[in-house]
Image: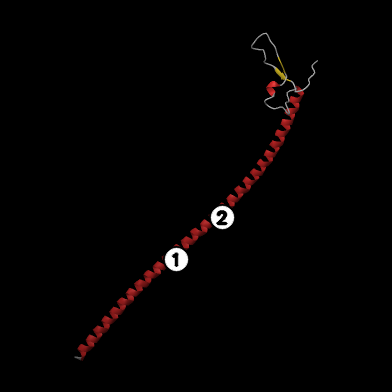
Amino acid sequence: EIEHQLSQCAEKEQLRQEKENAMLTKRLAELAQQEHQQREEARKELELRCRLEDERKQQKDREAELLAQLDALKGIQESIALDEAQLAARREEQHRQREAELAKLGMHFVGMDLDDVPKAPKLVNLHPDPALKGCLVYSLPMGETRIG
């Protein structure tokens, strides 16, 4: 009977060890799975960090490109402003030259209202052909004019 009890004790001990081994195996599998998950998460984190760094670099490159474009546009804007100033000066000079030429020809109507222009004195050509009559009109300045 002692053998029987020893045998039962041995069986119980063996079952207990098997259970403990099963639990340890299960715990080991769980730890292995956790380690795998942690490695996967670390890999994903590293991948995300790399992508984030790439995106930051691209953003800095894009900002540098946009700043260069902005500087170029400012230069063009300044150039256009100078061109506009030069054009305005040239336009004013041409306007003065035009007024001087019109004054030489007696066609400068400074100080005259647009309503008075049709009433202003003028020389009109006469021609026997009605198609050519009145084709040339030379306006005279208001006031006294001497001819001859």
| Residue at 76% over, 27% down | 100
Q: Which colour scheme appears in the figure?
A: secondary structure
Please say if 87 is above or below 9: above
Look at label 2 and name its amino acid.
Answer: Lys
User: Which marked residue is nearer to the observer: mark 1 or mark 2?
Assistant: 2
Locate the C terminus and report the quarter of the image it occupies: top right
| Residue at 76% over, 25% down | 103
The answer to which of 121 and 137 lies nearer the viewer is 121
As drawn, the residue found furthest toward the top would be: 128
Locate the N terminus and report the quarter of the image it occupies: bottom left
Q: Could you say whether the residue bearing mark 1 is in a helix, strand or loop?
A: helix
Mark on residue 60? 2
Please say if 55 is above or below 18: above
Whole-angstrom CA distance, mark 1 to mark 2, is 27 Å
Mark on residue 82? none
The answer to which of 23 and 64 lies nearer the viewer is 64
Nearest to N terminus: mark 1 or mark 2:
1
As drawn, the residue found furthest toward the left would be: 1
Local packing at callout 1 (Cα closer than 10 Å; few below 14, some 14-19, many 20+) is: few
Residue holding disc 1:
42
Residue 21, position as x, y percentages in the image? 31, 78
Residue 48, position as x, y percentages in the image? 47, 61
Look at label 1 and name its amino acid.
Answer: Ala
| Residue at 33% over, 77% down | 24
Name which quarter of the figure residue 102 lies in. top right
The answer to which of 7 and 147 lies nearer the viewer is 147
| Residue at 58% over, 50% down | 66
Residue 96, position as x, y percentages in the image? 74, 31
